[in-house]
Amino acid sequence: MTTAPAMPLEPSFRESVDIMFNRAVALMDLSPGLEEKIRVCNSTYTVRFGVRLRGQIHTFTGYRSVHSEHMEPVKGGIRYAMSVHQDEVEALAALMTYKCALVDAPFGGSKGGLRIDPREWEEHEMEQITRRFTYELVKRSLIHPSQNVPAPDMGTGEREMAWIADQYRRMNTTDINAAACVTGKPINAGGIQGRTEATGRGVQYALREFFRHPEDCAKAGLTGGLEGKRIIVQGLGNVGYHAAKFLQEEDGAKIIGIIERDGALFSEEGLDVEKVRQWIGKHGGVADYPKVKYLKDGATVLEATCDILIPAALEGVINMGNAARIKAPLIIEAANGPVTAGADEVLRDKGTVIIPDMYANAGGVTVSYFEWVKNLSHIRFGRLQRRAEEARHQLLVDELERLSADKGLGWQLSPGFKETYLRGAGELELVRSGLDDTMRAAYQAMRAVWHGRPEVHDLRTAAYIVSIGKVAASYRAKGL
C-alpha cells in the first residue's frame, strides 16, 4: 500500500522572516557577530493585567517587542486580535526594523499586540482595557516620545491612539512632547492629515513607481501604465479600501475582485469600491451584495486571472497550498507577510514579480514619522510657508496678465490653472509629497540592487539587502 507524499511543512511567519533575512545576508559581507546582532530581537515584554468589567475581573495578555535599537525611538503598531502571540509580534518587530531602514525613517523596529477580540466589548470597555494596557507599557518606558512610539495596526485605529496619548499625558503631566508618544491620532488630538489613508496611498505610489519602469513591468509580462489593469484586492479594511479606491478613481485601474472574511465578489466589468465598502459597513460582509458574482469560498478568487493581486489583510494567505495556482503576474504585499517563504519560492520560480511588504506598506510608518516630527515641532506643516508661496505665485500670474494686456498678446490662462497654481501647499499636500518622494527613493534603492547585482533575482531580497545594510552601518557607527 502506497501513501501520498507528505506536504512540506509551511514555515511560520517568524520563520519566513528569518528565511528571507538569511537569503539576503548570504549575499552580504557581514561579520557573523554583526549578522546575529541584527537578526535577534532585543527584548519582548509580556504583560498580563486584569480589568474589572461586567461585574468580574477579566485578565488580558499583551506584548511589546523591541527588535532593534540601532536608532531610537523604536516604532511599530499595536494590534488587537485573538491570534496575537509572541512569535508573531517579534516577527513584525523585525519587519519594522527593516521597513524603517528601507524608507529612511529614523526609528528602530518594535511591535505590540493585545490578545482580544474588539468586537466582543463595548466602546467604554475597550477604553478601560486600552488605558490599563497603556499604563502597563508606559511605566516601563515602552511608550515614550523618545524611546518607543506605537501606532495603529490590525484592530486598532485613531480612537485607541487617542486613548493611549491621553493616558500617557495623565502619567507624564510635565512632558511637553507628550503628543509624540504615539502616532495615528485623530487630527484634533495632534494627528496629521493623510495618516488614515497613508498605507493605502503608499501602495498606490509604489505601483505608480513600478509602472514608471518598462523594464520592470516586462519582468512581470505587463506593459503600459495602471489604467485598465485588472486588480484583485484581498481585505477591504483601511489599507485595502484606500489602495483600491485611489487606484480605481485616480489611476483608472479596474477592481475586478474583492475578498472579505465571509466570501468574495467578482466582476470582469469592475466593482465600485466605495459602494462595496458602504455595503460592508452596513451588513458586516459582502454576502448578498447585488448584481455581481458572489463566491462563499473567497480564497478561490486569489487564484483568478488578473494583472495585479493585492493581499491587504492577514499573514500567510498565499502559501504552499495555493501558490502554484496563483495566476497574477504581479503581487504587491499591502499586508505584513501575506506570502509565506515557501510560497515566495514557488512564485519566484514561476516568474511572478512580488513588490515586498517592507516596502509596499511602508506608507503608514512614513506618515507616522511626519506626525511625530509635527508633534515635536509643535506646528502644523505648511503654516509658515503656505501664504508666502501663494504671494510669489500671484506675482508671476499678475506679471503674465500685465504683459498680455500691455503687448496686446491676448494670452489667456487655462481654466482652473490660475486657481490651482495660486494655491500654496497645506499639510495634506506636503504629506502626500513627502510620501511620494519616500516611495520613489526607496524603490529606486531596491531597483539598483535588483538590476545591478546578477545574484539578486527578486525585489524582496533587494529590499532586505538595502535595509540590512543601513542597519549594519548604524551599528558600525556606534562602534559595534
Image (cartoon, helix red, strand yellow):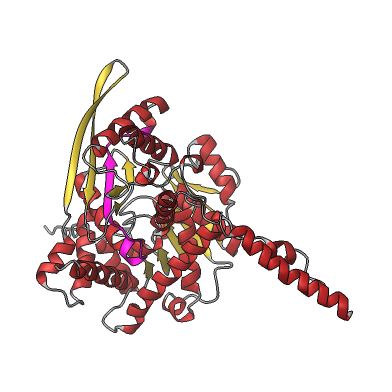
Tell whether position 117 is magenta: yes
Picture layout, residue 124 above or below residue 242: above
Quadrant of the image for the C terminus? bottom left
Q: Which stretch did the figure color magenta?
A: 100-118
**In the current view of this chain or complex, which residue is farthest to the top?**
55
x then y, percent, for residue 173: 34, 34
Query: In the picture provided, is 272 more to the left or to the right than 393?
Result: left
User: In the image, what residue occupies the spot 38% across and 77% down?
Assistant: 447
Residue 341 falls in which quadrant of the image? bottom left
Query: In the picture provided, is 228 more to the left or to the right than 416?
Result: left
x then y, percent, for residue 258: 49, 52
Quadrant of the image for the N terminus? bottom left
x then y, percent, for residue 158: 44, 41
Residue 169 visible in rendering: yes
User: In the image, what residue occupies the spot 32% across and 30% down?
Assistant: 129
Query: In the picture provided, is 291 more to the left or to the right than 139?
Result: right
User: In the image, what residue occupies the spot 36% across and 79% down?
Assistant: 448
Residue 153 visible in rendering: no
**In the current view of this chain or complex, which residue is farthest to the right?**
408
Q: Nearer the viewer, residue 218 or 249?
A: 249
x then y, percent, for residue 95: 28, 58
User: In the image, what residue occupies the spot 24% across and 35% down?
Assistant: 136
Picture layout, residue 35 above or below residue 4: below
